[in-house]
Image (cartoon, helix red, strand yellow):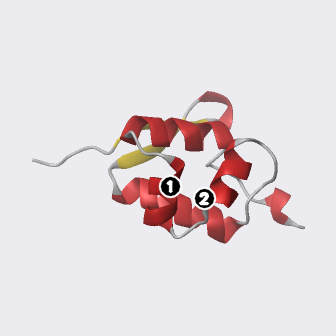
Amino acid sequence: MGQGDHCKILTPALCRAARGYLDWTQMELADRSGVSRSTIRDYEGDRHDVHRATEAQLRLAFESAGVAFVRMQDDKFGVCPKSVEL
C-alpha cells in the first residue's frame, strides 16, 4: 500500500467534476488518458483507490484539455479552466 503518504489531488468527486466541466463521458476520459473505463467507473464510484501513476494519467488528460486543479482552503482542490495568455 504506502500510497496514503502522498497528497492526492484527484479525488473521485473531483474526477467527476472535471469530466462534467469538459462534458466527457467515462469512455472519453478512458480514451484520452489510457486508463480503463472500468477503473474510472470504480474510482468515481468510490469502489477503490487508484495508484499514483493512474492518477497522474487522469490529471494529464484533464490538464491537456484545459482544466486546472487549484488548491482551496483546508488543502482541498477545485477545478477551473487554465488561464489563457494573450
Give the crowd class for mark 2: few <14, some 14-19, many >=20 residues within 10 Å: some
Q: Which x, y percent locates residue 73? A: 61, 28
Query: Closest to the observer: 59 or 72?
Result: 59
Residue at the spot of label 2: 37
Instruction: Name which residue type carries label 2.
Output: Arg
| Residue at 42% across, 45% down | 24
Instruction: Work out how far the residue at label 1 is from the one at label 2, CA to CA, in angstroms.
Output: 6 Å
Label 1 secondary element: helix
| Residue at 52% across, 35% down | 17
Residue at the spot of label 1: 27
Check if mark 1's residue and mark 2's residue have beta carbons within 8 Å.
yes
Mark seen at residue 71: none
Label 2 secondary element: helix
Figure quadrant of the N terminus: bottom right
Q: Is residue 40 left or right of residue 81?
A: right
Instruction: Name which residue type carries label 1.
Output: Met
